[in-house]
Amino acid sequence: MAFSTTPTSNDLLFRLELEHPQRLPNYTVIAQSAAELLDIQNSPSVSMGTYLIDSEQTRLLTTLSIYSLRGDSRGQARLLYMNATALRIWKDMGKLPTQIGSQHRPPRDALLSFGVPFSD
């Protein structure tokens, strides 16, 4: 049985993946409704620092990254872009985030609202 040395489409795909590796999403996109925004404790920049101090987890401050962006509807009045550490803490705080997606980095017009800037 003879084997062909002609590259297959799978060979091409494998080579392209090596040349252009996929970037895994670093940020989970959280939507907050207008009703949620009425409670100041739903703002990470207000409540998360206090939670970390009270739970003696201040060492995590240098690993958090949360960006925010104004939403475009009452159901998505604010969008938060949280890295994995921030999302875990948010859930530990008893928050029930509405996750609507994930992406490698926040949009350019999103503002850092808590933590440290992202890096590649």
Image: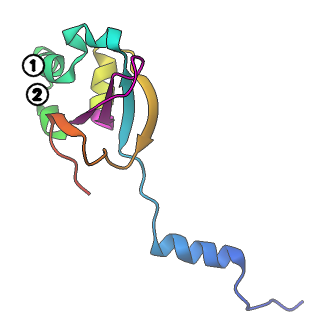
Which residue is the extreme one toward the right?
A: 1
In the picture of the structure, the residue carrying the numbered disc 2 is 58
Residue 94 visible in rendering: no
In the rendered structure, the answer to whether residue 1 lies left or right of residue 28 reads right
Labels 1 and 2: the sequence-earlier one: 1
Tell me whether the residue at label 1 lies in contact with that at label 2, contact meaning CB atoms closer than 8 angstroms. yes
Q: What stretch is highlighted in magenta?
A: 64-85
Which quarter of the figure is the N terminus placed in? bottom right
In the picture of the structure, the residue carrying the numbered disc 1 is 53
Give percent across and percent down for residue 82. 30, 34
Amino acid type, residue under disc 2 in the picture: Thr
| Distance between the alpha carbons at the discs numbered 1 and 2 | 6 Å
Amino acid type, residue under disc 1 in the picture: Ile
Give percent across and percent down for residue 74. 39, 17
Residue shown at 27% from the left, 24% from the top: 89
Residue shown at 11% from the left, 16% from the top: 50
Front residue of 72 and 115: 72
Within the image, what quadrant is residue 63 found in? Answer: top left
